[in-house]
Image (cartoon, coloured by chain):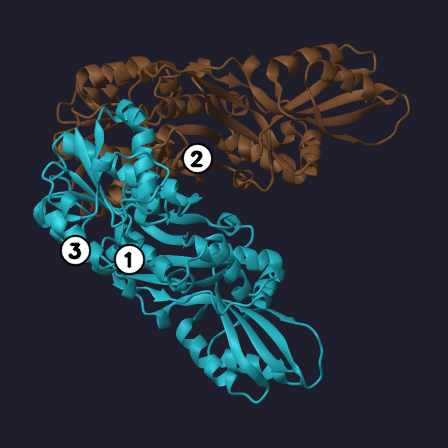
Chain colours: A brown, B cyan
Amino acid sequence: MINIGIVGLGTVGTGTTRILLKNRKLLRERTGLDIRLRKIADLDVESDRGIRLTRDLLTEKAEDVIDDPDIDILVELIGGTGVARKIVLNAIKRRKHVVTANKALLATHGIEIFNAATRYGVRIGYEASVAGGIPIIKVVREGLVANRILSIYGIINGTSNYILTKMSEENAEFGDVLQEAQRLGYAEADPTFDIEGVDSAHKLAILASLAYGRQFTVKDVYTEGISSLSPMDIGFARELGCKVKLLAIAKEQGSRVQLRVHPTMIPEDFLISKVDGVFNAVYVKGDAVGETLYYGRGAGDMPTGSAVVSDIVDIATSCEDGTASVRPVVPVLKRAISVMRMEDVLSMYYFRFSVLDKPGVLSKISGILGKYNISIASVIQKGRRHGKAVPLVMLTHHARERDVTRALKSINILPVISRKTIVMRLEGK
Amino acid sequence: MINIGIVGLGTVGTGTTRILLKNRKLLRERTGLDIRLRKIADLDVESDRGIRLTRDLLTEKAEDVIDDPDIDILVELIGGTGVARKIVLNAIKRRKHVVTANKALLATHGIEIFNAATRYGVRIGYEASVAGGIPIIKVVREGLVANRILSIYGIINGTSNYILTKMSEENAEFGDVLQEAQRLGYAEADPTFDIEGVDSAHKLAILASLAYGRQFTVKDVYTEGISSLSPMDIGFARELGCKVKLLAIAKEQGSRVQLRVHPTMIPEDFLISKVDGVFNAVYVKGDAVGETLYYGRGAGDMPTGSAVVSDIVDIATSCEDGTASVRPVVPVLKRAISVMRMEDVLSMYYFRFSVLDKPGVLSKISGILGKYNISIASVIQKGRRHGKAVPLVMLTHHARERDVTRALKSINILPVISRKTIVMRLEGK
């Protein structure tokens, strides 16, 4: 018998509990294990969450879980990097295995936590920390273990994908869609982490650590959000045969890896560009397997609970056969790979210049771009309003970020430029 | 050190060998294991396969692998159900773990092989047997372990998906596209298993066994191929907003499971309907996780090799920590679940009647359908050729297969029907 203690009975905690109760018989049939929910800690032990729990299962104190010698696995589901960090570290010191859905914690204090786990011989399960119900951690760690990972593209924040989908479908402004998303419960009251790319950056740091064998933190990830996107740019993207997605990108280039989160144009015939609404998807390209994609719900009580329970089963299995403390906690964390500086990244670009409609503007702009080795792939110029500001859209071939920054600096101060140029990166063939 | 012996140096054998040589250092860094290729058996030890192998690594006799006491894992990659069965069973008896890509073998002799493995305490890895490089076995067995599996839809035969994609894109006849596919190497000289759905049925039997905890065989799967499909029906499907795919379907209904492979219309806005060409995808719906989808290459040397090597690593890990003979070989194989007879299946249907263009035909046909509780969702009738045969297309709401069979029997003998009615099943919302 394996005893489970849960700390945090919020959305994911409730889903996890529901699955453990509902599918207990199925889990026993499949695994031969008797997984028992022994204790659940939450500050609120009174609210009705729609599940039947005996009162003695509940406690208000996390310590009741941490200090219970019979509990084998502590499931941390309170989130954040403060209290959660202490609970996880204390549980590890008491030689409990830990399962967590906490991406912020792992992307910030991962090294400390994994080192502690190695020292005390316990395992850390974190399938639920990235892409909710999609078993992407297991896929990258085990399913694709034979592969050098060439690139990862993730749509791993459901809130921003929902907002982008709505902006695209309804030609709506960011602010309006965000408000609607908040009303529907798809965005939090403080949506900063979701819309500014921070949540995606947390998850990318975790995925890239697995893929490249070095513990990255959120600080290693270049991050831009979606709050300054306009429906006009999404419209131009559509005209150019592309969708706009908040992509989390990891790419290996020799001994360096690119880690970046930003709004990205992708050709609409790419499978990942068809991932709409709150759904998540992770595209992984390996040197042997080629292109693969994994799709599902990135949040929610039951999908995330599904991932939590899969970790519980994995660890329970290794408790049962005695290998829990033998197997490595994480893949080797010492590969010599460094993070490429953003200014060194090569990408294709979308520019929307706001130009005064005068003769010679196009030649002036393209002259500056040429000076910085930025070559133009296509141009859209529409609407003639002599002497007034009109949009001028360009797609470039591959150019270096550093050159783009410099070129735009020169262009933005031209008298014919009426507003700061909008820039988006483009991934594709 | 873990010693590997490969039997069969064809496409997948060569890919597996290439990965083990090329990524050996990476595998060691990731797993801490030293996985060594010790022997490769193939009748042809002379051909140049583009990999550098020392001559003493090669042997013409499978026995040299089976009987080598130092080999821990035998990798069976010759295919078929004759010699391969003997090799696998002999290896098991010598207490070697087995990795195989052989879906026909497992879907035919799975019970015998898994029973033998259980008896001798060895493990069977078969990730490569379904959907090539997509780690779908691991996903269903471990990643989604918390879920009751409600349904599985698989595009798991690249050859037929390539043919259907081409037929759709080019409005081409089946026979012409098959010939082209054979010329390009996407279809074998004898394509029967691929185009008649047998290969998909093998793979579905394996997936369903994992999902539902009972060892199904290919005989449990109702199977129809794509060879009688016409571009006309694919065109009508398109008009109705659908794609036609050869789907492998497993659905749980109470204590029964549907297992069927047949051409299927699916709404074009479903993600799986966008899986084109030789690519594979498996859609899995779980009671907790909801909808998920897994996409990648279903065949080829390196993708399938990626799956073979992931099995090798899994088993090597458990050899190293001593659990290889402790862990169950397969999920429990004794759940009380039976296969639903095809005639009991409820589905939506597409009918293409060839009718003589006369008054009263529609009422006659819909009258018979009504008698069998088949209600019509939509009708397409085009092209007026008084007194001549014209197509009359109908979509139905959910109806029972038994009723459909009976209704069509009555309809097909009507004097106004000039050809046997074409039937396709439709899955959707």
Report the residue at 31% width, 25% height from top.
B26
SS under mark 2: loop
Is residue A347 shown above or below B316? above
Q: Give whichever of A111, B42 is nearer the camera.
A: B42
Whole-percent x, y for residue A112 in the image: 30, 12
Whole-percent x, y for residue B217 in the image: 26, 61
Q: Give whichever of A6, A202 is nearer the camera.
A: A202
Three-letter code, disc 2: Gly
Q: Is residue B114 left or right of residue B51?
A: left
Indicate the chain on which mark 2 is placed.
A
SS under mark 3: helix
Indicate the chain on which mark 1 is placed.
B
Quadrant containing the N terminus of chain A is top left
Alpha carbons under labels 1 and 2: distance apart: 35 Å
Is residue A54 shown above or below B251? above
Q: Residue A298: which numbered mark, if any?
A: 2
Report the residue at 35% width, 17% height from top.
A215
Give the image quarter of residue B139: top left
The reply to whether discs 3 and 2 touch (Cβ–Cβ < 8 Å) is no
Three-letter code, disc 1: Ala
The reply to whether discs 1 and 2 touch (Cβ–Cβ < 8 Å) is no
Circle 3 crowding by C-alpha within 10 Å: few under 14, some 14–19, many from 20: few
Q: Residue B86: which numbered mark, if any?
A: 3
What residue does disc 1 label?
Answer: B104
